[in-house]
Amino acid sequence: MLDYSVSEVKGIGEKFAEDLMALNIHTVEDLLLYFPSRYDVLEILPLSELIHEDKVTIEGRVLNTPSLSYFGRKKSRLSFNVEVENIAVKVVMFNRAFAKKQLNVGDIVTLTGKWDAHRLQITVSNYQKGSMEKSSDIQPIYSVRGDVTSFRLKKAIQQAIQDFGDKVEEILPPDMITAYKIPTRNHAIKTMHFPESRTALKHARRRFTYEEFLLFQLKIQLLRKRRREASMGNAQHYDEVKVANFIKGFPFSLTNAQTKSLNQILSDMKSPYRMNRLLQGDVGSGKTAVAAIGLYATITATKQGALMVPTEILAEQHYQSLKEMFGELARVELLTGSVKGKKRKEILADLQNHQVDILVGTHALIQDEVHFADLGLVVVDEQHRFGVEQRRALSNKGLHPDVLFMTATPIPRTLAITAFGDMDVSVIDEMPAGRKEIETYWTKANTFERVLGFIENHIKAGEQAYIICPLIEESDKLDIQDAVDLYNQLVDFYPPSIRVGLMHGRLHPTEKDQVMKEFAANEVQVLVSTTVVEVGVNVPNATIMVIYDAERFGLSQLHQLRGRVGRGDKQSYCILIADPKSETGKERMRIMTETNNGFELSEQDLKLRGPGDFFGTKQSGIPDFKVADMIHDYRALETARNDAAEIIQFNLLEEDPKYVKLRNFLDNEGVFDTVLD
């Protein structure tokens, strides 16, 4: 019955039902689950506890006849005094002339509005004659648009609860409700809309927070289980002795975090299930070395490896470093859009004949003409830059190859277990020994000339610098420095011996590559760029990163940009030029100067920005939770994940009668169809 059209609710006609569609309310269930976006708690507190300029509620007796005055066009001001705790409090109401006739000396009134502690005055936004029924009143505030008003929506929800409230089925097993001390589903719905007390509301919210997380995690765990079942017979019998000798040949020792992540990867490769693992690590933590060992292991298992990266320049860098690492041990080839004609045909033929061991490239790797003889391991670098379909197309090149995704965006554990719940996660959270920490400074725009002088001194010592801008060209809407304008200024500012380059997203890929090649070869000393240099570019000679209008970037993005320097043995610097107006902006700058730890920064970024902004929600796979908040409710998220894992592991949905309603609910939501797709 809950899937009936919303027009089945008494009082909702065709026009109102149409208006409700703008809020994505189509069925009775949609209406019942359209929860308030926030709550205003009206609570009468003693005058001594009221905070200056806060929204407060007071109750008092009218002491004098209200005085009415007019100003402007049809604007009015009503003022009078009320007695509260034997103290006269001044009351001001704007544009409520009608209230003069309603309020008489001696009346008891309840007033809500902005409190001025210095004047003992309240500027009223709401009032009612008489006392509040309770000492505190919780007002639900709904998000509405179009012709739907809060009043009409509230009335419709009240009617829907009256007509259909007893038809709401419980979907959680009774022992779960008892163990977590949460209300039943129908009781929690009523409380969310019409809370009797703060405590009741807290428990109703707890119930839906857990329910939302559990349903999402069940979908993720089901997907994970189906993937594992579909990828049996994938064990790679690599040569452990050869792999150990390969590691010994490195000019450095692996860190403990690298070793731990590597062991998890090799264990996955050995297992009969297909690996689906995310390798997280800060810029410079040594993810590529770990991936290279995995690729070598797959070669010793007589299979081929592939490494897919987002840009041609990054593909070329990885190709050169892997060739250096492998030497005579493996044949490494590069395949990008620039590899054409005879050379391309040769590589493709040799790949199909298993004469190529490792193929490095951009999305060119997933074109139909590319055929591997026996693909064992796929490594995808900066995996969030590729769409799901691109990643799947590459995986489908082999007979269920193991897949390792790498990212230098440190994702907080809370997000990793949610967004990547269908993956195993390995973390490299320690930096190689002897690496110099980048010094980070925050300065204002009026010191820019001094910053340019600082850059010039370092260029004279043979070093290079990046200067990053948020925009490409001048915008009327935003008063921020743009890359083209800044490039022109710097060409005029520096002597001809210092060459300035310009890089942005609107350049043709070949032009971008040309600029980066010139910068890598120190033919360009200062590179003015938008954020296109954020990922993967490796220029060890670049020691200064200047970020203009830094307050316009999130912490994680600032950290990614900072990671473009500090790649050689010289001391590196990151200079943030920002005049943030908000406290959040100032806090971001402070955090950046205090820590170089990407994981700490990502946790802070999550708190400041929220998960949608952090990832770009469309890419992330994170659903829009109605009640749950992944940051504040992370303990409930962990609990729901553990419960979901247990339910799937022990087949409780199929075999335990207590879980029948939960299974039916998931079935009605089409979860099993999606998972089996």
Image (cartoon, rainbow, N blue to C red):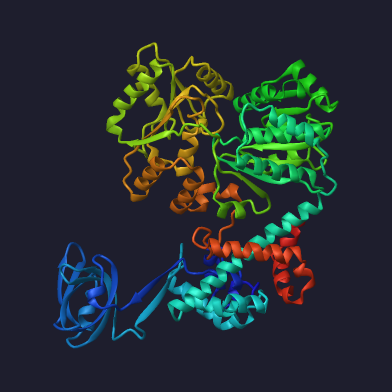
Residue at figure coordinates x 77%, y 46% from the top left: 274
Q: Nearer the viewer, residue 335 or 20?
A: 335
**Which residue sits at x=78%, y=52%?**
228
- Is 138 in front, or is 180? 180
Which quadrant holds residue 42?
A: bottom left
Who's the residue at 60% across and 35% down the image? 286
Q: Nearer the viewer, residue 148 or 635?
A: 635
- In percent of width and height, residue 539 lies at 52, 24
Residue in the picture at 55% in, 77% down: 188
In the rendered picture of this protein, how many numbered marks are placed on residues? 0
Give the percent coordinates (x, y) of residue 312: 62, 26
Residue 425 visible here: yes
Can you say which quadrant of the picture contains the N terminus? bottom right
Q: Position of residue 618 (x, y in %)?
A: 58, 49
Tell me, yes or no, if residue 467 can be seen here. no
Farthest-out residue, top: 497
Look at the picture and state if 130 lies above or below 175.
below
Q: Nearer the viewer, residue 275 or 141?
A: 275
Q: Is residue 266 left or right of residue 289?
A: right
Locate residue 79 relative to residue 415 in the image: left or right.
left
Please state the horizontal and vertical placement of residue 192, each as a whole percent of the image: 50, 74
- 492 relative to 546, above or below: above
